[in-house]
Image (cartoon, grey):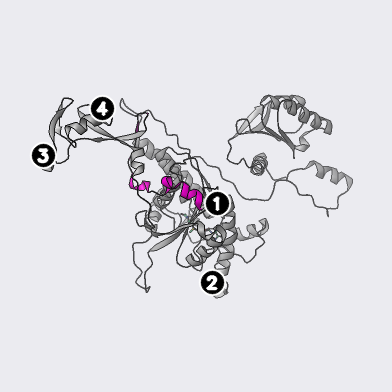
């Protein structure tokens, strides 16, 4: 699932430079300046915004899995243009709905009509797949917010007392069942039948009915386009200020809004990846961790944010946040801590009757900065004498880059960014293991045949060496041969 909340093009809310060659250099220039506005007088008001959005949406579509969807928050400035380019990129038939989110309660009396909602454009990568999954998706689990915290092998359930509410007044039958005399919800026959089928159970001196989650799911209602119960921007802003102890972000989205999308689309796929590439204060990350803690999910988030500089007059800047990424980073950190402590309060582990459950939600995250490659690019115009040339050949990587930089570039190129990374000791040398058996990255110098043997014993699928780490070509050829003998499928030197 992708959720984005791009700048709405209100005149001064987005960073834009009229340079379409989005080279790293241009990117660095853009991010080292405060946000340049997009004044209406520019004559390219909508064009500039659309030029910024189009390539991003195209990429978004390519990144989506077949059962993926995208939700895009937008207001009335660009909703029409946005849906037009979405129709072009995703195909009109893949449009699911335009949702209205009531985001404001106050009224602007200076306007002819005061706008109190945002839109959410909702598209599928492939509507046929979504139609097929409809029974899992087209329902609103939000309507059923109960905790199904027991499981009897037949499924998760919650217990509800079978007492007849209102007693005699409501005409509930009065009789004795399993030694308890009371007004009951059902007749004696129904009670007996439910008891025999395991739907009614006795706990202590009371009778309870089991409500199964699977039954509740069948009765969930279809989601509507009118969302007036998922939080206001003003409330979200106040909550974020409290979490961050003051300075924060101006217009964060409510966590509940994104939780609703997550519940809709990932209720039965709790391992999904969630992407937000206008992440701002990282509300999406907060929502993902919150829902994971609630339903035991393992959804992962990827937040992307331009390091747009904070306005020097802003509270955030004064509190030491240089750019919006730093605000988002701190928010994810604090949100994780808050979710954990709230969970622990609800599941006390002290005392005789306390729970022995552990908080297992993953609240860890890694932070990456975009940069050029770590590998020295070959410049054919370089004028080097023989000695300099020989030196240059030994320098595969740029001088100012760390081993971790190189490791993550390799992982990125292999498409294994989500795999676990471990620093391990192999024959007394520090190497990296990616995934359990997936890959060993060896960036050490003076690689010996013992090192190669020790790597082989770990039986990885792939091994990556630093080319300059071998003393000579013979050693390299031997290493390749020996690792192949150990069953390593892919050996590369960079
Ligand atoms: C409305 S905010 C997102 C707020 C976020 N949903 C939250 O809850 O905090 C829009 C984001 O778009 C970013 N942005 C502005 N211009 C951009 C551009 N040209 N490219 C990428 N991001 C941009 C801003 O830095 C800002 O963080």
Residue 329's x, y, as percent?
51, 48
Residue with the mark numbered 4:
196
Q: Report the residue at 14% width, 32% height from top.
A: 182
Residue with the mark numbered 2:
39
**Does mark 4 have its CB less than 8 Å from ligand 1?**
no
Give me the disc on residue 304: 1
Q: Report the residue at 67% width, 58% height from top.
A: 23
**Above or below, comparing residue 238 to residue 386 in the picture:** below
**Above or below, comparing residue 441 to residue 327 in the picture:** above
Q: Quadrant of the C terminus?
A: top right
Give me the disc on residue 168: 3
Query: 93 or 375: nearer the eye?
Result: 93
On the picture, is 198 further left or further right than 455? Answer: left
3D distance between C-alphas at marks 2 and 4: 73 Å
Specify whether residue 201 is in view.
Answer: no
Q: Which residues are magenta?
A: 127-153
């Amino acid at each position: 699932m992708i959720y984005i909340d791009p700048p709405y093009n209100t005149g001064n809310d987005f960073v834009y430079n009229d340079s379409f060659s989005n080279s790293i250099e241009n990117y660095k220039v853009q991010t080292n300046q405060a946000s340049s506005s997009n004044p209406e007088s520019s004559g390219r008001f909508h064009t500039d915004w659309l030029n910024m959005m189009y390539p991003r949406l195209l990429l978004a579509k390519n990144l989506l899995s077949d059962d993926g969807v995208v939700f895009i928050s937008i207001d009335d400035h660009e909703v029409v243009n946005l849906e037009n380019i979405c129709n072009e990129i995703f195909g009109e038939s893949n449009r699911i709905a335009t949702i209205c989110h009531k985001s404001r309660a106050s009224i602007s009396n200076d306007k002819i009509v005061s706008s109190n909602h945002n839109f959410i454009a909702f598209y599928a990568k492939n509507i046929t797949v979504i139609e097929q999954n409809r029974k899992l998706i087209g329902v609103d689990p939000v309507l059923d917010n109960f905790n199904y915290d027991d499981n009897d092998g037949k499924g998760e359930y919650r217990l509800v007392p079978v007492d007849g509410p209102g007693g005699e007044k409501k005409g509930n039958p009065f009789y004795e069942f399993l030694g308890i005399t009371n007004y009951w919800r059902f007749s004696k026959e129904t009670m007996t039948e439910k008891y025999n089928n395991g739907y009614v159970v006795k706990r202590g001196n009371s009778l309870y009915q089991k409500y199964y989650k699977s039954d509740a799911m069948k009765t969930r209602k279809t989601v509507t386009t009118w969302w007036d119960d998922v939080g206001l921007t003003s409330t979200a802003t106040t909550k974020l200020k409290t979490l961050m102890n003051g300075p924060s972000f101006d217009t964060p989205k409510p966590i509940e809004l994104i939780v609703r999308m997550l519940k809709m689309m990932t209720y039965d796929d709790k391992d999904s990846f969630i992407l937000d590439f206008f992440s701002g204060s990282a509300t999406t990350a907060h929502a993902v961790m919150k829902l994971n803690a609630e339903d035991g999910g393992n959804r992962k988030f990827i937040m992307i944010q331009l390091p747009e500089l904070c306005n020097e007059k802003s509270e955030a800047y004064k509190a030491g946040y240089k750019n919006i990424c730093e605000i988002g980073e701190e928010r994810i950190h604090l949100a994780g801590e808050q979710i954990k402590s709230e969970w622990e309060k609800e599941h006390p582990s002290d005392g005789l009757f306390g729970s022995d459950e552990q908080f297992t939600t993953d609240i860890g995250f890694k932070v990456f900065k975009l940069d050029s490659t770590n590998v020295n690019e070959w410049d054919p115009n370089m004028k080097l004498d023989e000695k300099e040339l020989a030196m240059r050949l030994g320098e595969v990587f740029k001088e100012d880059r760390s081993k971790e930089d190189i490791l993550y570039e390799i992982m990125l190129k292999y498409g294994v960014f989500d795999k676990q990374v471990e620093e391990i000791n192999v024959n007394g040398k520090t190497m990296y293991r990616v995934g359990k058996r997936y890959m060993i990255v060896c960036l050490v110098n003076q690689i010996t045949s013992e090192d190669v043997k020790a790597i082989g014993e770990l039986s990885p699928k792939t091994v990556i060496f630093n080319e300059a780490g071998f003393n000579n070509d013979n050693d390299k050829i031997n290493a390749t041969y020996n690792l192949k003998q150990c069953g390593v499928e892919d050996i590369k030197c960079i």
